[in-house]
Amino acid sequence: MKYALCIAAMTATLLLAACGGSRDVATAALAGDAHAAPAPTGLGAPVDFGPPQGQPIHAVLTSPPHVPPPVNRNYPAKVIVDLEVVEKEMQISEGVSYTFWTFGGTVPGSFIRVRQGDTVEFHLKNAPDSKMPHNIDLHGVTGPGGGAASSFTAPGHQSQFTFKALNQGIYVYHCATAPVGMHIANGMYGLILVEPPEGLPPVDHEYYVMQGDFYTTGKYREKGLQPFDMEKAIDEKPTYVLFNGKEGALTGDNALTAKTNQNVRLFVGNGGPNLVSSFHVIGEIFDRVQPEGGTVAQHNVQTTLIPAGGAAIVEFHTDVPGSYVLVDHSIFRAFNKGALGILKVDGPENKAIYSGKEVDSVYLGDRSEPNLKAVSTAATAHAAGTLTKEDQIAAGKQLFTGTCSVCHQANGEGLPNVFPPLAKSDFLAADPKRAMTIVTHGLSGKVKVNGHEYDSVMPPMAQLTDDEVANILTYVINSWGNPGGQYTKEEVGKARAAATPAAAEH
Ligand SMILES: [Cu+2]
């Protein structure tokens, strides 16, 4: 019938080609090409791996950055996955909390690992204290909605559906309950690995890293419980771009680890909801990448694109010890929105490959620190009305590191002819209040500090909140032989609002 229609329409050569083309594909599939050995590429009906064998197996689920062990099986099994949706308040940044919606209590959700051909019996539970219904759409599922319609689950209920893992690969799963964007923005995504029948080649470390963009009503690092901002989400203007749902989830004490001379495999997903990730590890070259989670591998890759709702398998060998920085190379996201993690490689130097000299502290600043405890202490004290000068100095010191120290140096001495000193600065002492305008609006033009002239530009530190600026300046004015004093959040707010750039003629 279709063929007859084609002939009837066969007035243009183009159409003829189109009809003939589609028929070739159909014939090839019917002729049984697809029933040969599992083909990594090409169209056609899937290989029938046969019914599940042996006893049902309960899937091992892991929290990020951990990955369950290889399935290590040479037959298809029935695998039971038990996943609970939990809505909970967690830290998104030091001193900043957010009500996340999670698969398994973490962002990203629990990592699921099965083998191609497995029959997966999926149990989705929604905790009784949830406020919202949720469901799950697994990109590794063949079937309408990837399981979404069959898994719609009200608070205090559970649903069950079964699917056969027909295609191997690394797949994103996510909640698909309306408003879908909001459920994803709140952290409802994770990864499921469908191993090829023969498994993946063994490596020394496997890690689970997933990027996501987050939208809060407050600014980046604004303290307290921050609600979701729908307008920012629609405008695709995230407040945070993060690996594993929290600023610092992969830095300091939480850094990923490896030794030199090891093979590392990262399963890197991107939950979105909006941004595409330019995933890069500073100082490493990916020896092998399976872009988009597909079967064809790329080699010698510097940066790999990970679409929202996509994932990649990234592998490299470690040669030189040191800290390797995972970033979204859309780089403001890394240094100003949180998309930054560390892989710490320990072992003997390899001078033949790399000579040495670490510049971590300056490059990463406070983002390589395990935490900003003093900062949240000060925020809590401020909220309670008990903030002391000592709290401010302690918090200011933390914030100074990495924000101001990048230029003015950790000891406040600056760099000759480039960055003026803050230590014993006569310019600062002459008018301490002016410093609030300098930090909030920047400074340019000629300035004379301690007898030396500087003619450069300090950009406005607009990412800092009023209380952060007050804390930093209170620290500065009480350090390195400066005259002492105190700044308040309110004063900084006024200086910011005055909106006239600092005059520099001195
Ligand atoms: Cu949901």
Image (cartoon, rainbow, N blue to C red):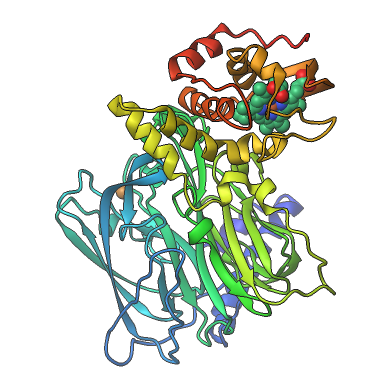
Q: Is residue 419 left or right of residue 249?
A: right
Q: x, y (%) of residue 385? A: 30, 24
Q: Residue at x 56, y 83 (%)?
A: 38
Q: Is residue 362 above or below residue 199?
A: above
Q: Nearer the viewer, residue 335 or 437?
A: 437
Q: x, y (%) of residue 132? A: 23, 44
Q: Residue at x 54, y 65 (%)?
A: 256
The reply to whether residue 496 is in sight is yes
Q: Is residue 178 left or right of residue 197?
A: left
Residue 299 found in image quarter: bottom right
Q: Is residue 174 left or right of residue 340?
A: left
Q: Nearer the viewer, residue 247 or 348?
A: 348
Q: Residue at x 65, y 41 (%)?
A: 410
Q: Is residue 405 above or below residue 249?
A: above
- Number of numbered markers: 0
Q: Residue at x 83, y 33 (%)?
A: 416
